[in-house]
Image (tube, coloured by chain):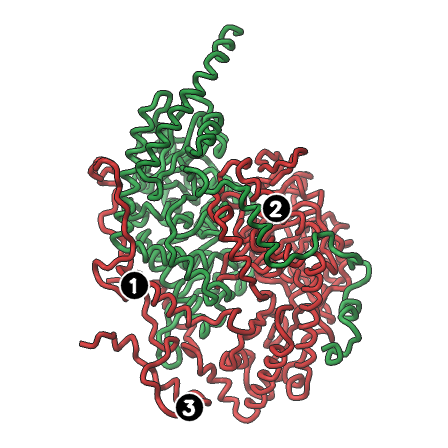
Chain colours: A red, B green
Amino acid sequence: MSPIDENHLHADPAIESHHPHASPGIAAQPPLQRQRAQTIFQKGAPGRRAFVCPDPEVPFVDVSELLPERFRRSEPPRLPEVSEPEIVRHYVGISKRNFDLDSGFYPLGSCTMKHNPRLHERVAALPGHARLHPLQDPERAQGALELMWNLQGALSEVSGLPHVSLQPSAGSHGELAGVLLTRAYHEDRGEVRHKVLTPDTAHGTNPATVTMAGFEVVKLATNADGGVDIEDLRAKADTDVACLMLTNPNTLGLFDPNIAEIAEIVHGVGATLYYDGANLNAVMGISRPGDMGFDIVHFNLHKSFTQPHGGGGPGSGPIAVSDRIAPYLPVPVVTRGDDGRFDLEYDRAKSIGRLRGFQGNYGCFVRSYAYIRSLGGDGLKDASEAAVLNANYLLARLKQHGVAEYLPLAYGELCMHEFVLSGGPMKRDLQIKTLDLAKRLLDFGFHPPTVYFPLLVDEALMVEPTETETKETLDAFADAIAAILREAAEDPEIARGAPYSTPVRRLDEVAAAKNPVIREVLV
Amino acid sequence: MLAAIGVGSTQEIFDRQIPAGVRLGRGLALPDGMGEQDVYEHLRALAARNTSVEDELSFLGAGMYDHYVPALIDMLMERSEFLTPYTPYQPEISQGGLQVMFEYQTAISELTALPVSNASVYEGPSAVAAAGYMAKLHNGGHRIVVSAGLHPHSLQTLRTNAHGFGAEVVEVPLRDGVTDPHAWAEAIDGQTSAAIFAQPNFYGAVEDAAALSAAAKSAGEGRGPVVIAQVDPITLGILAPPGECGVDVAVGEGQPLGNRLDFGGPSFGLFAAREEFLRRMPGRIAGETVDVDGRRGFVLTLQTREQHIRREKATSNICTAQALNALAGVVYLTWLGRRGIVELGELLLARAHYARERLSALDGVEKFHEQPVVREFALRLDADVAAVRRRCARQGVNPGVDIQAVSGREEDRGGLLVAITERRTRADIDRLLEVLGAAVAAEREATAPTQREATVAA
């Protein structure tokens, strides 16, 4: 019997033969990334283990005396039975089937995939931070509370709004906090309002949040320049509107030049103005939401402030608010006494209450605070300037002959930190869709931009390079786009069949949704 | 670069797009930037002003626990391939993360005996609120009945959310440390969308989950409410799983599974349910499929539930969740393994029993309730808890959580919640016994004259 599971190592030669750049000759073994996926539940053998249980050290008492039979589990959960070396090989092996920011360019629009300094991991792992219990008495967690206080102060300064709560767990959680704050604000004034306005370019989290907070979504149209349609706003802004949720720069990468007028209209009907901070990386130290007239802002520490995204979290979504919203902030609130001691305050009569357990994702606060202290005020401004410069340079490169006629800029001439191209002409003239271009980029070693968002742009490609990429990387990406378009002009089938070099090729998502298999079949 | 763009300076790019009236026009009033070494020293100095579980003998729990995190978890979480990608929107280059989600879902389904699990939500209390919202979407009821044994943070978070989505939250009191079964059945009516309890509850007591579920189902005049249990995953090696107790939705705080304390986060929330809730679940779900060559692969699936597709009709607004923390969770469960999770549960049970019996034999200390417990239990002190805790702190011992400080309930006065993990040895427990006993005695002695004076004055 072979010591190696042959099924496990079975190579699929079809991929090699489909690959347009396939080199002749067949490797003796497929590389790790090409092996057939086997889950940890399909590995191991009965009795194998990694964990060695400590000796209980206390007098033996039969379990049945401590826990009545009817409360007990009859069969152990069928968790894997594997040794430590197997666990390490398994997870290191599957990690190699992931693309990541440390390996290559990740211009995912509205996600701000900037470099994650390793210093942040080191300081977050210090036992004084990492092994601090959330219910430790405030007098014995002064360092943590000071860090939170300082971070609040920095976010307040960046946003131009005086009060900050770090509690929300991610951007969408910050949005929920913001809309619940809006509800509390109106209710406290004895007003009942039912509607929240969101532009049609808004992130999907905005309308979803509105529904969860018990309001009705009213969509705002976009004008020819890509900003809020002011006439539509005037028509829809009435005293039944609780809030307008806006992203500025918006998801088209455009700063809305009418923001002061928008704020005036919204405040004129007594509504609040909410700032979705997903795109804050464009304006740090340059323009502040509070100065634009916003009442509530959420930050994405996992975007602008470089908390690593972890493949889908953790994130952190602090909020900053104006004076009139401050009484309703979630509890607990960090306070500083006259003696300089920090504390947590729970007793606030008008607070909306808690949004989660404890004080928020402190581990993320440590990383983002380290980032802010590394850059300083001027450094944050430099970061935004470089992000906008990089985006405009990449946009300029993509305006070259051979690209712009197939992938025109959807709106405007310049952009802020990101821009949106339309793949409509490409689809019409080269017979490849935005999806095909995105998949072909994978073979060139790039993560594709955000695709098919915002919804109002045909075949949208939303590109956000961030400030931490070099000119050489931007050039290489622009060259890759041009190369793919040239290739498509000769043979669109290549892009339509891409990718070829990835651990798996295009996956059948329809089948996955139609007949969901969401866990391993255990025997 | 500027020439390619066709501008004279970076400033010009901003000038042409942002009206002067909303530009800051000054530098940010923040400290100057620092080099890596200086930032490290600053963050180290802040850390040094915190008393972590390495600096004292800690019995703190109440939602987050000092369990041992194996070294291999640190190593895997620090790998660039897991640490630095975004949500897996491009499955062809995200098979590692997607497979982790699929394995995580499998492990959580096994642990809870519920067939569908998502790939994580934020953390425990907001998971309870998310389950309450799902129940309202499911059956339209406007009333949520909760046991007073639910963690106060969960109860408060649920109230915050329910005020928004439009449901009344009704609290059912405890009797003898567990949910009062009669009050529970009476509180649930035909308008009740969800009935929620914790297992074990906030006071450490093991609830009769099967009886609570059955009572809820039969109480709701016709269609019963959605029965939701907040579970502690590390107890599920020995406690009957929610899926076998008639529970519809299990949620919980994932921190005990391989995640560090981090002063409260990030960790992850687990969320598992019966099949009928699959298309209403919040959060990402990884599903198995094949690629064009017939090769096994994983994708994000059932995305028509989600905000980026369904917008205002989505079942939740959640986007970024806790993928990296869920990775730690599934690696931890794999490391414990099928037998380890039972052995660990039995160890916790034995040590908690030892600690509870010894501590409640001290003068001025009694059990808060007589119900069975697993790894955490409530005591009632005949002394001011805050003062006793201060006395213990001077001896380097943190004896546990002041229950009333968390719950705010008058009837919790004197309550101390003691958590025992596998890191607290018998010697540690004996040390607690000595220090807590002395602190309670000293505090009673110190306050006795004051009380006499109070009596005389009265």
Amino acid under label 2?
A: Ser
Q: Tell me if residue A355 comes above or below residue A256 in the rendering.
A: above
Give the image location of residue A307, x and y in percent: 55, 58
Mark 1 closeness class: few <14, some 14–19, many ≥20 residues within 10 Å: many
Instruction: Say which residue label 2 marks.
Output: A165
Marks 3, 1: nearer the viewer: 3
* The furthest residue to the top: B456
Please determine if labels 3 and 1 lie on a single subunit.
yes
Q: Residue at x 53, y 63 (%)?
A: B310
Please determine if labels 3 and 2 lie on a single subunit.
yes
Please determine if labels 1 and 2 lie on a single subunit.
yes
The CA distance from mark 3 to mark 1 is 35 Å
The CA distance from mark 1 to mark 2 is 42 Å
In the picture, measured across the screen, residue A178 lies left or right of residue B215, that is right
Amino acid under label 1?
A: Phe
Amino acid under label 3?
A: Ser
* Chain of the residue that carries numbered disc 3 in the rendered image: A
Q: Tell me if residue A485 comes above or below residue B353 in the rendering.
A: below
Q: Can residue B140 be seen?
A: no
Instruction: Say which residue label 3 marks.
Output: A23
Image quadrant occupied by the C terminus of chain A:
bottom left
* Chain of the residue that carries numbered disc 1 in the rendered image: A
Mark 2 closeness class: few <14, some 14–19, many ≥20 residues within 10 Å: many
Give the image location of residue B347, x and y in percent: 28, 43
Give the image location of residue B297, x and y in percent: 38, 72
Instruction: Say which residue label 1 marks.
Output: A41
Q: Secondary structure at mark 2?
A: strand
In the picture, measured across the screen, residue B306 lies left or right of residue B340, that is right
A36 and B451: which is toward the camera: B451
* The furthest residue to the left: A1
Q: Earlier in the sequence, mark 3 or mark 1?
A: 3
The CA distance from mark 3 to mark 2 is 56 Å
